[in-house]
Amino acid sequence: MALAADAATMLAAYYLSLALRVDFGTPAYGWMQAHMAAVVVVVLQMFAMSLVRAHRDSWGRFRIKHAVRMAVALCGAAAFFILMRVVLPDPNHFWARPPYTVSLINAVVCWVFMMVTRILYAAWLAEKRKEPLFGRSAEAELTPEVKGLFSGRRVMVTGAGGTIGSEICRQVASLGPAALVLVERSENALYEIDRRLRSRAKCPLFPEMVDIRDRSRMEKLFGEHRPEIVIHAAAYKHVPMVEMNPREGLDNNFLATLDLAELSIRHGVKRFVFISTDKAVDPSSVMGATKRLGELAMCALGGADVFRAVRFGNVIGSSGSVIPLFEEQVAEGGPITVTDARMTRYFMSVAEAVSLVLRAAAMEGDDRLYVLDMGRPRRIVEVAEEIARRHGYRPYIDMPIVFTGIRPGEKLEEDLGVDVPGAKRTAHGKIFALGGTPVTQDELAAVASRAREICASEMPDAEVRTVVLALAANAARGSGADSAS
């Protein structure tokens, strides 16, 4: 495509140069000779461009060095045609020896035309990179129900400095809560979200640097701030890392969640929202299993219309996810690494995902588990190819894509789990309600007890992984911890 565009540009430049030479009249040697000369000029110019490797890089990566290469190629072609005027003095050979002025004007005009096309293309690419990757809306409208839930209420957000947590804080802060408590264990992340919200928040902010696993500290925070709404976004979410550290994943993602839920019951929290993941559906990883246990906890705990989980897939731009990784790899010149060409994932912008989470949080009813409609799953390799193109690279040509193999705990395909009995689409078309898995509080207590035993045990990590997966599977079937030994 780029070669064809350059050839068309060279033709346009040649005919414009010729028209300027003959004052837009008819050449004395006739149009047939002029057309033959046009073909020869374009072929020679393209050959000269290939000699200096002017076509090696795509237009989107146009730099000064490319402009210099083009100038050298076009000047070389013009010098050749001027030389041909000496070698072939016969006017009948015009097709191989255009007038000096045509050759010189053509070199300048062609260079300017090609510079302009490349600069415009680079500018178009820069604008395209600002567009949503998959064309999804950036944010769903926040309804009066959402505003009514959060306005004037004291809200606590855990994992406030993460990608999802910080967006939750941003959107909730705009709804005029009575107070917004930012719970985050990373000092830098807490500083950043607090700094960004200070100038625009419509409420008092309380940044609290604390680990959610510190129960005594969290109990003090609940007593001090008396939150009415808790949105629990803090989690270990990277599958390979949690596979290598299964106890920490179980402790943080499930047991700490259960502790927060129990604190919420004791302190009269009116709404507790647990952020879940599509990896919780038939989990093959410890991370997914711990999130599934968190979902089951939301279903088992008492308090009608208090506890609920919201499940969704990948958010675009989330730290550690494939898209920022691909962007980083492209910036470093490649290669882009993809685990498997067949792998697919669901994607949604973080702003849209959070706005739908807040919509789900505001819904009335006894449903405990909500799932966001993520659209169709995307092949990861197609995402890599699109990101390469957006940066002006041609996938597999000047930006290699390497397949590294599936890592422990990963699946080729994820499932949102909406094709189950009882699942229904809510009044908001992008949110499904799945009701809740029937898990009793006694069964939940047994699972929690077994989870604490696992975290305190000395069993090898490989065995921990096996037991945690069995624990989640058995709990989902209603058999509690009996078979997870």
Image: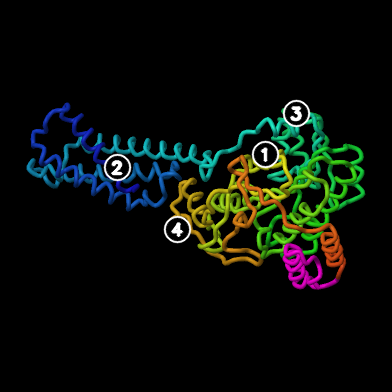
| Residue where numbered disc 1 is placed | 359
The location of residue 163, given as percent across then percent down, is 68, 45
- Name the spot of residue 295 as percent of width and height, x first: 74, 54
Of 383 and 45, which appears nearest the observer? 383
Q: In the structure shown, which secondary structural element does the residue marked by tag 4 occupy?
A: loop
Locate residue 55 relative to residue 448 in the image: left or right.
Answer: left
Distance between the alpha carbons at the discs numbered 3 and 2: 66 Å
Determine which quarter of the picture holds residue 60. Answer: top left
Determine the secondary structure under disc 3.
loop
- Which numbered disc covers residue 396? 4
| Residue at the disc numbered 2 | 75
Query: Residue 18's spot in the image, x, y percent?
Result: 19, 34
Which is nearer the N-term, disc 3 or disc 4?
3
Closer mark to the observer between disc 3 and disc 4: 3
Q: Residue at x 73, y 28 (%)?
A: 199
Determine the CA span between mark 2 and mark 1: 63 Å
Whether the residues at callouts 1 and 3 have beta carbons within 8 Å, the answer is: no
Residue underneath mark 3: 176
Q: Which span is picked out in magenta?
A: 458-485
Q: Nearer the viewer, residue 20 or 199?
A: 199
Asked if labels 2 and 3 touch by Cβ distance under 8 angstroms, the answer is no
Verify whether residue 15 appears in magenta: no
Local packing at callout 3 (Cα closer than 10 Å; few below 14, some 14-19, many 20+) is: many
Density class for disc 1 (Cα within 10 Å; few <14, some 14-19, many ≥20) is many
